[in-house]
Image (cartoon, helix red, strand yellow):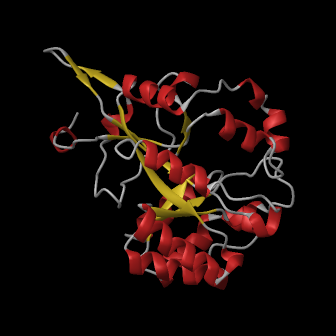
Amino acid sequence: MTKAANRLQYPCIMINAFSPATYHPWRGEFIQAMAIFGLACSDHALLPAQKQKKGVYVMNVIDFRFRPNTAETISGIQNSKMFKGLCEHIDFSKMKPQTVPEVVADLDRYNVVKAVITGRDCETTYGSKSNNDSVIEFVKAFPNKFIGFIGLDPHKGMNAIEEIKHAVNDLGMRGAAVDPYLAQIYANDAKYYPIYSKCCELDIPIVFTTGPATLVPNAIIDHVAPRYIDIAARDFPELKIIISHGGYPWVNESIIVAERNRNV
């Protein structure tokens, strides 16, 4: 563990997990500096515990993209128009549901001190109601454990802008989340630009969901290619951008985009 990492209160970040009851602590798939917290992360901070000569160093963890595996959340994902095919493919129905207090107890057991829950809104393209209300409820129930990011549909125009303003100013949300492959437009599409502008004004980060969109109907993988996030990052240098899932399968491209832009 480096001296710099030892000075951090939360030196480890993990991306994209359900409750710890469903997995053994694992190496994070993509370690990022979290602009919202102003944290750095050492490459030694990948393991949940690090033995030292005198005792054991217990690693604190921030799970940056977390979904509480409540019965409602599991049902919503596996029965959605977007992810039904994927869930059948990976036998998602075997996921063990828990109550929110049980989820929080497991997080505590694995030293997960904070968990960021991202909302999703793709109502225009898939007709599915957003899950923002549940994210807000999770944060209200455990404000010291959960950090909420509001999901936004770029096709909703000024309604999306009013939603983000209300979510941040009145409901305590601390970031935004978008899914270009579900919106079926590129990250540098003009429909996103009012959202980026408002994020800059509110001084909040935005998460781009990337990845292969496996078995998602009508999804085009090119919509989430990091090269288009690069254009948005250049157009909005004040926008704090997080690329979820490491930009897979363009992981190397994601690394270059992060190297090129201080705000990614």
- Examine the rendered structure and indicate whether residue 138 appears above or below residue 112: below
Instruction: Determine the image quadrant of residue 133.
Output: bottom right
Residue nearest the observer in this picture, 131 or 181: 131
Q: What residue is shown at x 50% (from left), y 58% (from top)?
A: 149
Instruction: Determine the image quadrant of residue 85.
Output: top right
- Residue 118 shown left or right of residue 170 in the figure: right
Q: What residue is shown at x 66% (from left), y 40% (from top)?
A: 73
In x, y percent, where is residue 155? 71, 77
- Examine the rendered structure and indicate whether residue 54 appears above or below residue 50: above
Q: What residue is shown at x 62% (from left), y 34% (from top)?
A: 70
> Is residue 64 visible to us here?
no
- Residue 212 shown left or right of residue 64 in the figure: right
- Examine the rendered structure and indicate whether residue 44 appears above or below residue 184: above
Q: How many marks?
A: 0
Q: Quadrant of the N terminus?
A: top left
Residue nearest the observer in this picture, 10 or 254: 10
Q: What residue is shown at x 37% (from left), y 27% (from top)?
A: 108
> Is residue 167 visible to us here?
yes
In x, y percent, where is residue 5? 22, 41
Q: Quadrant of the C terminus?
A: bottom left
Residue nearest the observer in this picture, 157 or 12: 157
- Residue 59 shown left or right of residue 104 in the figure: left
In x, y percent, where is residue 229? 57, 70
- Examine the rendered structure and indicate whether residue 206 appears above or below residue 107: below
In x, y percent, where is residue 179? 66, 62
